[in-house]
Image: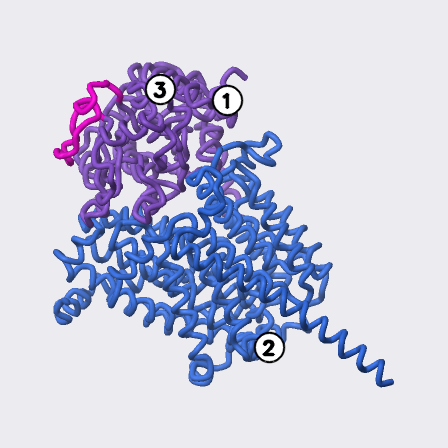
Amino acid sequence: MVDPLAIFAQLADPYLLAVILVCSCYGLIIGAIPGLTALMATALLVPFIIFMKPLPAVAAIISASAMAIFAGDIPGALLRMPGTPASAAYADDAYGLTRKGKASLGLGAGLFASAAGGLISATVLSLCAPWLARIALSFSSVEYFWLGVLGLSCATFVAGPSLLKGMASLLLGLLLATVGLDPVSGMPRFTFGSTNLMGGLGLIPVLIGLFAISELLRNANVDLVGEQKANRSGSIFATIGEVVPRHKTAIFRGSFIGTIVGALPGAGSDIAAWISYAMGRRFSKVGSADTDEGAVERIVSASAANNASLGGAYIPATVFGIPGDAITAIVISVMFIKGINPGPTLFLNRPEVIYTIFAIFFVANLLMIPLGIGCIHAFGLILRMPAKFVSPVILLFCVLGAFSVENTLFAVGLIIVFGLLGYVMEANSIPLAPAILGLILGPLLEQTFMTTMLKSQGDLIAFFNRPIGGTIGVLTLGIWTLTVALKAFNSANREGELQTDTNQV
Amino acid sequence: MKTTSRIAGALIGAVAANALLAADALADWPEQPVNLIVVAGAGGGSDYTMRLIARELETSGGQPINVINQAQGGGIVGYTTYTTAKPDGYTLGQLSPFAQFKILGQADFTADSFTPIALVNVDPSAIHVAADSKLQSLDDIVAALKKDPASLKISCGGTCSASWDIPFISLMMAEGIDVAKVNLIPAQGSAAGLQELASGGVDVVLCSVPETDALTAAGMVKTVAVLADERLKRYPDVPTAKELTGKDVTGGTWRGIAGPAGMDPALVSQIEGRIHQAYETESFQKGMSDRGFGTQYMGAEDFSAFLHQHEAQTKEVMNALGLGAGAGK
């Protein structure tokens, strides 16, 4: 281990602390704008940090991305416009609380869970990064395939009251995910000769369309003045004091799932949030209920997970130079430029550097609480303004967000098309969340399935003959069979009871 | 009101400046901001290289260079944007291996769709195996493939029929291997390919050498050969395929700057001069070597010849792989 005093000495550099503060504020603002993601916040930083010293450069990315992931919750909760894909899982729950005048409950809980998730993953990162990285590297396409299938099962938990409509939405998402170049053969599919469609339907424009534009359309039809009452700014600190003890299991579970999923290269914060959300709904008594308390339980488990996954992604990145997500891909590139080449030798030869980087995680996540509260209050003002002033501004940001991610006008067209689609779907009470899940998981499933088949030259046994992959596979199939069997058994039982009832009468 | 009229004034000024520019196309480039399209996402190697050169061009030319990332469709969207732009020198783009798009029926650019200006980077492909693999040398790989071409799982370190696998397949063709039967597996980039190698999912990964630094240091990956003319300065212990097999096959990825077809030759030579100047700066050279990117310069003429050579090699290999069927269409 390394001398903690040396780390403190490194951290006490005022320049470093100033960078963390400035980049935190910057990350909060970018993340809070719908469509501008944590990835984008990071990518935009690169031209500036190239001139910085190594530690401040990495610190800038860590603080900006952590804040951006949290800040994505704010427009999700206040306007039902998830700022980042990672916030989409629980946007509905958080928005539901806001409409009941409990915005500070949903956001405060999310804020604390985000910070806690970040801190827990930083602890895991500091204690056992090299060991976890080895496990993460033992995942091949087979394991990822089963992980994707397990992820799909989450759709049943976010499907809402009608399973049938939920499945329809999921399949729509999977279908939309096939647009573009085939990830394996490179053949164009459903592109109708359009170059723009070759790139597929970008997740961000689709997300903005389905959630934000459709909500604007709905608001245009409803008089919102009476609806958005609300004691928006209850004390957030009081909320934290109340909420945390009651939901500590959810926070721990979310942080754990987030760290693990984040550590797997190829699965990022969005998948972490969805899986954790589904676990919160399925395996927690509180979380399975459609009450405010249940919503908070689900929000904290998913918020903790998406922030924890950021730390998790640094595990394979620092140990083996394999990025856990797109943000750490940028981090690796910055580390190379700065001469801190990631790899096991970094842990051996320059432990003070790597452990200071981990320490920055703690600083950034602690800073998140006061800054986050300020940000929530600032955005809370939006709710006090009449919708007729707010809506055009939001529309402007939606257009800007879509354009800035894809750099094409086509993306702006996409948000309109998906806005209409989202409006129609919700008007027919088809949930949006499963479609997003399908869009996120579709490419992963297809790539890993095709890659596995190519490797085994068409032999399906390949999905079961690796120890970890086979276990997850059998487990997933087991859960599915059991669920179906239980359902059949229950309905048979009920029929039986009914029959006994009739017999008695 | 005042602001409005000021904006209007500025607009009129801008229009007038544009008109002047059209009248005197050969004024000193750049006289207005330049859009540089990068055909890859923000944060990757292409983005890094292009931003590095853009920074130097900005300092020397005094005009902003807007780097625009259009990675959609493997870069096809970006290529389309700048090949269909006005050839006035103010929309330029990154040019990297492109010949596979036409052969696969994905797009119809050829070398003639571009005005090549300058090439600034070449990174040779290399052949990597797991450190504990039974394959320990290029000879082992060739022997295994000669015995049964389908016996090894070979990750392309990205999409197949692209920068890393085309030169490797060329080499295998030269060795007399039935390459149509070789089991090539696409990956989502080299990191994903290396992950497969570490997890035992594939036997061989093809990608550049610096990308494996950390895994090599961890004792998990071994580089058996690099497909370059001579050994890389940074990796003096990695032999070239040429010294191992005697077959002169090289290749990999490369990055240059080009514009739409039909640019004025005088304008091209002016921009080329600027890029050459940027290439020579210490900060560009240092920025490239810090990341392990190779530097190599080609002016417009050499770059143009190189593009035709790239098309020919790609076509030959893809025909041998049985992918060339769409080539005639």
Residue bearing the label numbered 2: A289
Q: Nearer the viewer, residue A391 or A478?
A: A478
Report how far apart the C-alphas of labels 1 and 3 lie in the structure.
15 Å
Residue bearing the label numbered 1: B108
Report how far apart the C-alphas of labels 2 and 1 lie in the structure.
55 Å
Measured from the top left, where is residue A427 in percent x and y?
72, 59
Residue bearing the label numbered 3: B310
A420 in the magenta segment: no
Three-letter amino acid code at the position of disc 3: His
Pointer 3 local density, CA inside 10 Å: few below 14, some 14–19, many at least 20: some
Observer able to see residue B121: no
Three-letter amino acid code at the position of disc 1: Asp
Pointer 1 local density, CA inside 10 Å: few below 14, some 14–19, many at least 20: some
Residues behind callouts 3 and 2 on a single chain: no
Chain B in the picture: what colour? Answer: purple
Which range is magenta?
A: B228-249
Chain A in the picture: what colour? Answer: blue
Three-letter amino acid code at the position of disc 2: Ala
Q: Nearer the viewer, residue B302 or A299?
A: A299
Q: Chain of mark 2?
A: A
- Mark closest to the chain's N terminus, 1 or 3: 1
Q: Secondary structure at mark 1?
A: loop
Q: Chain of mark 1?
A: B
Q: Which mark is residue B272?
A: none
Q: How is the image coloured?
A: by chain
Measured from the top left, where is residue A356 in percent x and y?
20, 63
Could you tell me which residue is drawn at 71 percent across and 75 percent down? A493
